[in-house]
Amino acid sequence: MTSTSSDAAANGASSFVAVAIVGNPNSGKTTLFNALTGLRQKVGNYPGVTVEKKEGRCRLPDGGTARLLDLPGLYSLTPHSPDETIAREVLMGLRADTEVPDVVLNVVDASNLERNLYLTGQLLDLGIPTVIALTMTDSAAQAGVQVDATALQTAIGVPVIVVLAGQKVGIPQLLAALERSKVLVPPEPAWLVPEKIRADLDALTNRLVAEYGIKQRFAFVEALTLLMQQDDRAAYATEHLSSGVREQVKDAAERLAQDDIDFAAAAIAARYDWIAHVCNGVMRPHSERHAAPVSANDRIDRVVMHPVFGYILFFGLMAVMFQTIFTLGQGPADFIRDKIKDLGEALGRHMADGDLKDLIRSGVLGGVGTTLSFLPQILLLFFFVSLLEDTGYMARAAFLMDRLMSKVGLHGKSFIPLLSSFACAIPGIMATRTIGDRKARLITILVAPLMSCSARLPVYLLMTSAFVPARPVLHIGRLTVLTLPGLTFVSMYFLGMIAAFCMAGIFHRTLLKGVSPTFMLELPPYRMPGLKAAGIQMVERAGLFVKRASTVILTTSMVLWGLATFPRNGHERTPIGQSYVGHIGHAIEPAIRPLGFDWKMGIGIVSSFVAREIFVSSMGTVYNIEDADGNDKGRVDLGEKMKSDVSPITGKKVYSPLVAVCLMIYYVLAMQCMSTVAVVRRETNGWKWPIFQIGYMTGLAWLATFVAYHVGVAMGWGN
């Protein structure tokens, strides 16, 4: 594909190459994508579906630019899932929203060559110029195997470049190969079609070419898919499939069945014959010193996967991670908070009194500024999760947790979506598409929002830092490993996990009865985590959080400021309790008073249904407006103001450690996210399950908080 002159001029490049990066999960595809693009990438979704779309750019040796599209990790192009369907549509140029690739960059894991070559064979069928990036050669060597890249290139007929992306090995050669790909001859199909199925395959291929006017190679792939699956899941067939083609597929299936021929089995066997031939010619034994009877991976797995120590390690690792997030993030958070306060003081000195000054100080700085102060902890969360994924530990944790999850009807594959929900429930719910069992997938969707996402983080941090005494809980020597705020903080995450497992068990035995599905998972080798990749993900998530703060949270804070400021009696300020938002808060107070909450907390709960973190900005706005009269010192410290708030009815403080814990419990269990509701509706194709989810989570949150509050009061913890 050639760029327009304006594009070329704008980028200083002579040409563009559209590259689709395709490979198996855990093949090093994402690491390679990050190494090539750095921060020159963007993440979104393909329009109309929940499959993630990652794009980036890199400079080629001739000054041109490669546009890189990182397709989802796949084991094959047979369209059984949305991931596979999207990949086929992109590679065949069927998506108007995505650039047609000029070349396929196939990432192949040398330590799992046989399995990876199945996808390679399917890619070669498409007839698109292809370059292979051979990764994990170091892992293969440790396992006692060496892959001859030159022999592999000769056997397959496409360029093969050995790459260690984390160490930048092979990157220049790979870029040069991508540059030369513009003149590569498209590869021929790698495998030999068995004679017993060739006639039917050729006949259907020719018919698809005649009826749809598509390329011969694409028609071959479509015919192969239709005859293997005998349904309408081929890429071109998703839009329309003529009755004549349907009839031909049916006739072929019946004829093959009469001759006792399994088309799919014959085609798959032929592919594996080709794979075996290639591997026999390119895999060499490595030196004896690397072929140890017990590998380093196995030795580590003896501890990590142990039926007792494995769980201790997992829960201990989670506790340390969240305690570290709480401890390390506090200093930067205080710094941001102080700078926002300084800005508020400057505005107080230099701006004229009036609604604009009040809006900026109370609405913008009091709302958005308070939320932004928790950005450091959110970044640390994403950083640590990225490191754990890169090491290969997360796959082990999924396998380990399957023993528990299968008892409550969750699939082992549910662990990754649930773990992803610690960051955000939306990608967690989207990740359930890899779960083949419908009931297990639906159970996972229903409980995923119970996992404490990063949007709850500001609520937890505000409550724990303001109301939980900073007492040490666990020491190792002179080092304090765990504090009471840290323990409270960690407990909220474990509470969400326990609630998710319990509700999954209830659904598995009632609404969604079924047999616990079998779980199979490939365990990737342990690797040193990539700090650059983790940093890129951290910056990426920071941008998304700031964007959310500057749009949704800012808009909500400004609307809330207006509702809390008006109506006015002439030029005098209306007490916030008599404002529009005050009336709303007092109206819902009877429903939340049994939980220990007052009308101001009710305002935060209602407004945060848009997004959970808005609770903090709402409280910041409400307390700043309430404290605005006669205060020109800038933004009020929200934690201090909440601690000093006294009920005019009881004369007691509104907040206590018990109320703070109850608020956190409510936010652990309640469905307070409109975006998640929208994604659940899209994933389940209707409003039935989203409405049920809102109902059961709200009821669960109210009941659990009610019990916690009244048990706490009975035990004298209310003050």
Image (tube, rainbow, N blue to C red):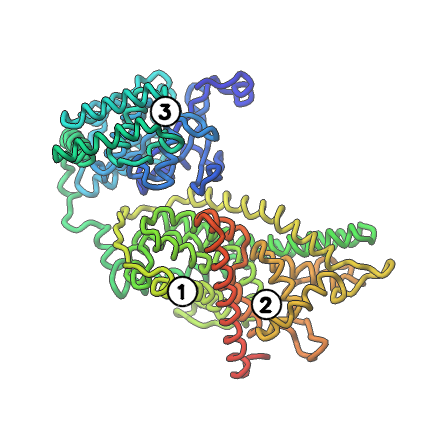
Q: Nearer the viewer, mark 2 or mark 3?
A: 3
In the image, 288: left or right of 633? left
Decide which of 454, 474 is in the foreground and name it. 454
Residue under label 3 = 103
Image height check: is 116 above or below 496? above
Q: Nearer the viewer, mark 2 or mark 1?
A: 1
State the separation of the CA atoms marked 2 and 3: 56 Å
* Tag 1: amino acid: Met
* Tag 3: amino acid: Val
Name the residue at 38% across, 46% down.
433
Q: Nearer the viewer, mark 1 or mark 3?
A: 1
State yes or no: discs 2 and 1 in contact (Cβ < 8 Å). no
Crowdedness near tag 1: few (<14), some (14–19) or many (≥20) residues, C-alpha within 10 Å: some
Count of marks, rendered view: 3
> Residue 212 location, x and y as percent?
36, 22
> Residue 612 location, x and y as percent?
56, 57
> Residue 334 location, x and y as percent?
60, 58
In the image, 83: left or right of 145? right
Numbered mark located on residue 503 in the image: 1
Quadrant occupied by the N terminus:
top left
State the separation of the CA atoms marked 2 and 1: 31 Å
Mark found first going from the N terminus, 2 or 3: 3
Mark found first going from the N terminus, 2 or 1: 2
State yes or no: discs 2 and 3 in contact (Cβ < 8 Å). no
Image height check: is 100 above or below 553? above
* Tag 2: amino acid: Ala
State the separation of the CA atoms marked 1 and 3: 47 Å
Q: Secondary structure at mark 1?
A: helix
Q: Secondary structure at mark 2?
A: helix
Residue under label 2 = 466
Quadrant occupied by the C terminus:
bottom right
